[in-house]
Amino acid sequence: MSEVQETPKPEKLRQGYTTGACATAATKAALTALLTGEMQTEVEIYLPVGRNVKFEIVACEISATRAVATVIKDGGDDPDATHGAAIIATVSWSIAEGIMLDGGVGVGRVTKAGLPVQVGEAAINPVPRQMITETALTVLAEFGVRKGISIVISVPDGEEIAKKTLNGRLGIIGGISILGTRGIVVPFSTSAYKASIVQAIKVARASGCDHVIITTGGRSEKYAMKRFPELPEEAFIEMGDFVGFTLKQCKRLGVKRISMVGMMGKFSKVAQGVMMVHSKSAPINFSFLAKIATEAGAPVQLVEEIHHANTASQVGDMMVAARIPAFFTKMSEYCCLTALNEVGGGVVVDTALYTLKGELLGEVSLTHEKVD
């Protein structure tokens, strides 16, 4: 009898912790050290997700008037730009009553409206602010202390790390944001990226933009900026693979005109109604592309060749070589139609289709109610 091999179970991805959770842990350690005069090596905090978690304190310094504690950000198995960053809390006595919270080196400063933090303040989001403040109040109460304290959160490498994020586009200057609504980082979660899209749209709207440009990546955004040089930087939003989500958020937040700019590969999926365009979300439908080619007047032999193509870009090259620009107009029109259908109409939708080298292939603008 042959042995039946069991399929190994995939390893469970390890969760990490947000910058907000790390800042809270560092604050508790620094404040406890200031109150007790004792070095802290570990603290436990309560996370919004509903559980207590222990954090290692990798460095702790104490003087008569202040204490400093450091936590190393652990992003788990999530590809996080802040993974490994030192999150530092400096707690000192204050003449003023209550708790004063601010950002130090490497924590960004908000310069544009539309974010959950007021212009001029440190980019420490509402939930982390609440976590830090409530944790500090709890520690003070435990020791029966009613003095005012100042808390400064710093990230020494924050300004460099911020270059890998959307902070500059959002108007957060000088460092990273202290983020997190749950305290944990779910590995490979799409929630963080979606949240950044919503924030980008809010910033665009707060900046007076009722026309936004949504692109699938940096290259298509570069082409879009050349296409719409009159628009401010805030109007350009990288949606990644989240086409449907971005379209719906644009309409929900009052955008009047949405311009989609992209290339053959992902927009060939949008044209057929696929609104999550990751390479694994759906294969390229060459029968659909052949249908568009037929509608554009392509000869039968060329249409048959499309069925055997390897990539959507190859199909585009075939149409360019055959001098059938109507193909790209048709595809752009289909993209607009499916986008309007996705949001239920009520907005103007443009589609601009480019080659990898930045050559405009086709462009269409449509506006009407939901398509049946």
Image: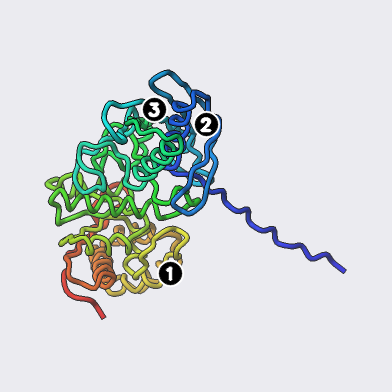
Q: Label 1, secondary structure: give it.
A: helix
Residue 359 - label: none
Residue under label 3, please give it. 90
Residue under label 2, please give it. 57
Crowding near the residue tagged with mark 2, few <14, some 14–19, many ≥20 C-alpha atoms within 10 Å:
many
Q: Residue at x 57, y 51 (%)?
A: 13
Are the residues flagged by discs 3 and 1 in contact, CB closer than 8 Å? no
Count of picture labels? 3
Say whether disc 2 or disc 3 marks the residue closer to the N-terminus.
2
Q: Position of residue 207 (x, y in %)?
A: 15, 48
Are the residues flagged by discs 2 and 3 in contact, CB closer than 8 Å? no
Q: Position of residue 299 (x, y in %)?
A: 32, 72
Query: Is residue 341 toward the left or the right of residue 18 in the image?
Result: left
Image vertical order of residue 224 relative to residue 254, above or below: above
Q: Label 2, secondary structure: give it.
A: loop
Q: Residue at x 26, y 73 (%)?
A: 341
Q: Kindly report the distance in space between the C-alpha atoms of the residues bearing marks 2 and 3.
A: 13 Å
Image vertical order of residue 95 relative to residue 196, above or below: above
In the picture, which quadrant includes the N terminus?
bottom right
Q: Residue at x 39, y 58 (%)?
A: 314
Tell me, yes or no, if residue 83 can be seen here. Answer: yes
Q: Kindly report the distance in space between the C-alpha atoms of the residues bearing marks 3 and 1.
A: 64 Å
Q: Position of residue 290 (x, y in %)?
A: 36, 71
In the rendered structure, which amino acid carries the disc numbered 1? His
Residue under label 1, please give it. 307
Image vertical order of residue 259 relative to residue 80, above or below: below
Say whether disc 3 or disc 1 marks the residue closer to the N-terminus.
3
Query: Is residue 279 toward the left or the right of residue 113 in the image?
Result: right
Say whether disc 2 or disc 1 marks the residue closer to the N-terminus.
2
Q: Which of these two is toward me, 254 or 118?
A: 118
Q: Position of residue 192 (x, y in %)?
A: 39, 51
In the rendered structure, which amino acid carries the disc numbered 2? Ile
